[in-house]
Image (tube, rainbow, N blue to C red):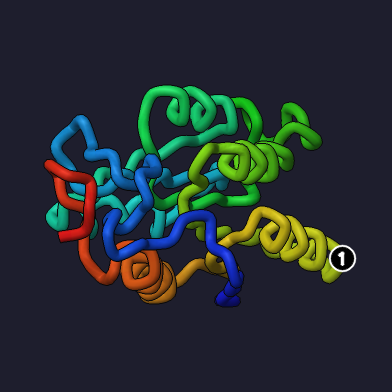
């Protein structure tokens, strides 16, 4: 995992305004959870980490919303505030077989990064890289840096690394506490 640090994160806690300065990260989840996690997974094979993560986080009040394409992610962002995003760069643009359109298959993750960056208050983002050539590695790391990703996670994805990155996000953006359901501020 590569930890990326920025001098000016997308949103930072101010002591008088709670953890998110009034950004979408402070909006309570309509489903009753404390934190909305956008979980994109583009691998058409079984992704054990993406299947297991929602079950691990649900008892903690995390509403993990899994999307399988860039179009699903777009629809989700229009109706639901996102507090943390996990963006798989292997995310296809559409829900089609990976063989159907090789170019579109590779663009969903990059477009999702762009969409998140254009939000009024972009959520902290964990980027999951694909295992490719050195040139692709450099392209993916550059895309993550440009999108101000909080961390970049290598494949094969290890659950302990994802959980540690999420712990660091909570520490940095929410003072180590879950957003409060009623006020949107860290409790």
Badge 1 marks a residue whose secondary structure is helix
Tell me if residue 159 can be seen.
no
Check the picture and name the quadrant holding the C terminus. bottom left
Q: Residue at x 17, y 44 (%)?
A: 183
Q: Quadrant of the N terminus?
A: bottom right
x and y, in percent, of residue 79 in the image: 39, 23
Is residue 187 something one can see in this rendering? Answer: yes
Q: Check disc 1 and report the residue beneath it.
A: 135
The crowding category of the residue bearing disc 1, from other C-alpha atoms within 10 Å (few below 14, some 14 to 19, many at least 20), is few
Q: Relative to residue 126, is residue 92 drawn left or right? A: right
Percent coordinates x, y for residue 11 in the rendering: 47, 55
Residue in the picture at 53% in, 55% down: 10
Residue 3, placed above or below residue 177: below
Q: Quadrant of residue 6?
A: bottom right
Q: Is residue 46 left or right of residue 43?
A: left
Q: Position of residue 22 (x, y in %)?
A: 35, 44
Percent across and percent down for residue 130 are 66, 59
In the rendered image, the vertical position of residue 185 relative to residue 12, given as above or below: above
Q: How many marks?
A: 1
- Identify the image quadrant of residue 127: bottom right
Residue positioned 21% across, 30% down in the render: 30
For image coordinates 61% across by 38% down, the residue present is: 118
Q: Quadrant of residue 153?
A: bottom right
- In-front residue for pair 186/155: 186
Side of 96 relative to 175 (left or right): right
């Amino acid at each position: 995992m590569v930890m990326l640090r920025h001098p000016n994160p997308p949103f930072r806690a101010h002591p008088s305004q709670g953890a998110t300065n009034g950004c979408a990260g402070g909006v309570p989840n309509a489903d009753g959870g404390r934190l909305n996690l956008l979980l994109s997974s583009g691998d058409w094979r079984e992704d054990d980490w993406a299947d297991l993560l929602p079950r691990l986080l649900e008892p903690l009040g995390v509403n993990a919303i899994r999307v399988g394409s860039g179009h699903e992610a777009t629809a989700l962002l229009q109706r639901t505030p996102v507090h943390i995003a996990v963006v798989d760069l292997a995310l296809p643009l559409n829900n089609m077989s990976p063989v159907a359109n090789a170019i579109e298959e590779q663009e969903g993750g990059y477009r999702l990064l762009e969409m998140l960056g254009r939000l009024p208050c972009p959520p902290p983002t964990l980027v999951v890289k694909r295992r490719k050539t050195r040139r692709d590695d450099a392209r993916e790391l550059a895309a993550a840096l440009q999108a101000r990703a909080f961390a970049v996670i290598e494949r094969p994805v290890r659950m302990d690394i994802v959980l540690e990155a999420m712990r660091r996000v909570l520490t940095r953006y929410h003072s180590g506490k879950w957003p409060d359901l009623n006020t949107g501020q860290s409790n």
